[in-house]
Image (cartoon, rainbow, N blue to C red):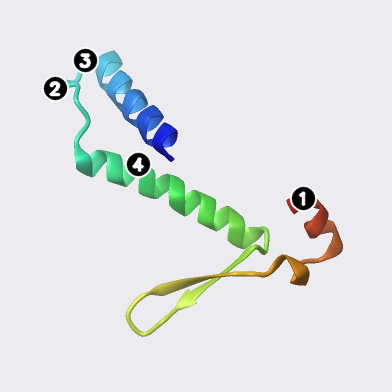
Amino acid sequence: MKQIVLETILRLSNEKIENGTFPTHVLWIDLRKELSNKIMGAIDQLIKEGKLKAGHTLNDRYLKPIPPDTLKNEERNKCA
């Protein structure tokens, strides 16, 4: 996770330099937004692959892992 955070900060900073945007430092809010987008993309993929179930509670959303033993044989082979 540390490597992902560092790579994201470096990329965002380099984009600012290339675009001539100043200051070139990365704001917390921009980093959180970028990482949140990556996390949501990964969660969406896991849901589509049938590895996670998602839904709504009264006040929030939930994520529930689907145990590997309930996956289809072909999906189980992909996970291994």
Type of the residue with mark 1: Ala
Q: Secondary structure at mark 1?
A: loop
Query: Is tag 2's residue or tag 1's residue first in the polypeptide sequence?
Result: 2
Relative side of 74 to 49, left or right: right
Q: Secondary structure at mark 4?
A: helix
Please tell me which residue is depicted at 32% across the width and 22% down the height of the picture. 15
Type of the residue with mark 2: Pro
Q: Secondary structure at mark 3?
A: loop
Mark 3–mark 2 Cα distance, whole angstroms, equals: 9 Å
Q: Nearer the viewer, residue 60 or 4?
A: 4
The disc label shown at residue 20, or none:
3
**Nearer mark to the viewer, of 3 and 2:** 2
Q: Is residue 7 above or below residue 31?
A: above
Residue linked to disc 4: 34
The disc label shown at residue 80, or none:
1
Type of the residue with mark 3: Gly
Mark 1–mark 3 Cα distance, whole angstroms, equals: 45 Å
At which x and y percent is residue 66?
65, 69
Residue linked to disc 2: 23
